[in-house]
């Protein structure tokens, strides 16, 4: 089956610093990648959708200047949380899809901002 | 009103019991319905995927969709401790996987040995 990886699996950073999270599709070419955020005991909320080589489309209420998304290749997308604050602490999950196939989810990255 | 409503639980049942998980949705434009299983601190994995009203069976799992009442269900037969997880119902409008997925809040399920 299709495999999506994320790196790192968890990260702790100081308030004000930036953190980059990578999402890779290991055995397929992901034309579209998605970034979700999940707070404890809550559901996944879509943050943005990105197509390879294009600017990401952000959901309402998600600051595009704070959450920088790059989808430079068909197998890699990155999410950079700039000037992170404690309220950004969350579980960040990416998913990837190839053409019209279903979305495959990564294992998630747990971010803790001190 | 949330687009997808799901009882958060927690739900605890003995091993071997039949489990019924349910969701309702508000928008009749939703066409595709999914159930995901999410273990603690892991990403969700797709369990079932249905399009039309009716039942779809896969092993011990049965997904049921009733579009007339906007009600979706997941049944787990012969439940096992390894089924303990959070189950998320989800839906989307379009056929393409690039369509936005709307998730329910998830139901935490615990199977007691």
Image (cartoon, coloured by chain):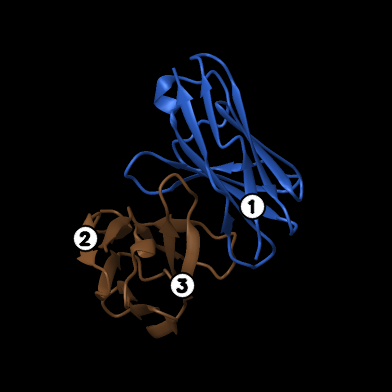
Chain colours: A blue, B brown
Q: Which mark is residue B12?
A: 2
Q: Are marks 1 and 2 in contact (CB under 8 Å)?
A: no
**Mark 2 packing: few (<14 Cα in 10 Å), some, or many (20+)?**
few
Q: Which residue is mark 1?
A: A4
Q: Image quadrant of residue B104?
A: bottom left
**Residue drawn 30% across the image and 64% down it:** B26
Give the spatial CA distance, label 3 vs label 1.
19 Å
Mark 3, other Cα within 10 Å: few <14 / some 14–19 / many ≥20: some
Image check: B90 left or right of A26? left
Q: Position of residue A58 (x, y in %)?
A: 54, 41
| First in sequence: mark 2 vs mark 3 | 2
* Image mark for residue B48: 3
Quadrant assignment, res A19: top right
Does residue A113 lie above or below A68 as drawn?
above
* Chain of residue at mark 3: B
Q: Position of residue B102 (x, y in %)?
A: 42, 57
Most extreme residue toward the bottom is: B54
């Amino acid at each position: 089956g299709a495999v999506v990886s994320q790196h790192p699996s968890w990260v702790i950073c100081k308030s004000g610093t930036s953190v980059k999270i990578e999402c890779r599709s290991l055995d397929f070419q992901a034309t579209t990648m998605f970034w979700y955020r999940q707070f404890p005991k809550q559901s996944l909320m879509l943050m943005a959708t990105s197509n390879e080589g294009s600017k990401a489309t952000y959901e309402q209420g998600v600051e595009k200047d704070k959450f920088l998304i790059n989808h430079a290749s068909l197998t890699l997308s990155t999410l950079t949380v700039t000037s992170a604050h404690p309220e950004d602490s969350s579980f960040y999950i990416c998913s990837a899809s190839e053409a019209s196939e279903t979305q495959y989810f990564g294992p998630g990255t747990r971010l803790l901002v001190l | 009103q949330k687009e997808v409503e799901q009882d958060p639980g927690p739900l605890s049942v003995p091993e071997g019991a039949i489990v019924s998980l349910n969701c309702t949705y508000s928008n009749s434009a939703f066409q595709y319905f999914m159930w995901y299983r999410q273990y603690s601190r892991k990403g969700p994995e797709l369990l079932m995927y249905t399009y039309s009203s009716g039942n779809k069976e896969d092993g011990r799992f049965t997904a049921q969709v009733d579009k007339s009442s906007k009600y979706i269900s997941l049944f787990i037969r012969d439940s096992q401790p390894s089924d303990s997880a959070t189950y998320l119902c989800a839906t989307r409008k379009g056929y393409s996987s690039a369509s936005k997925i709307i998730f329910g809040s998830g139901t935490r399920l615990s199977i007691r040995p």
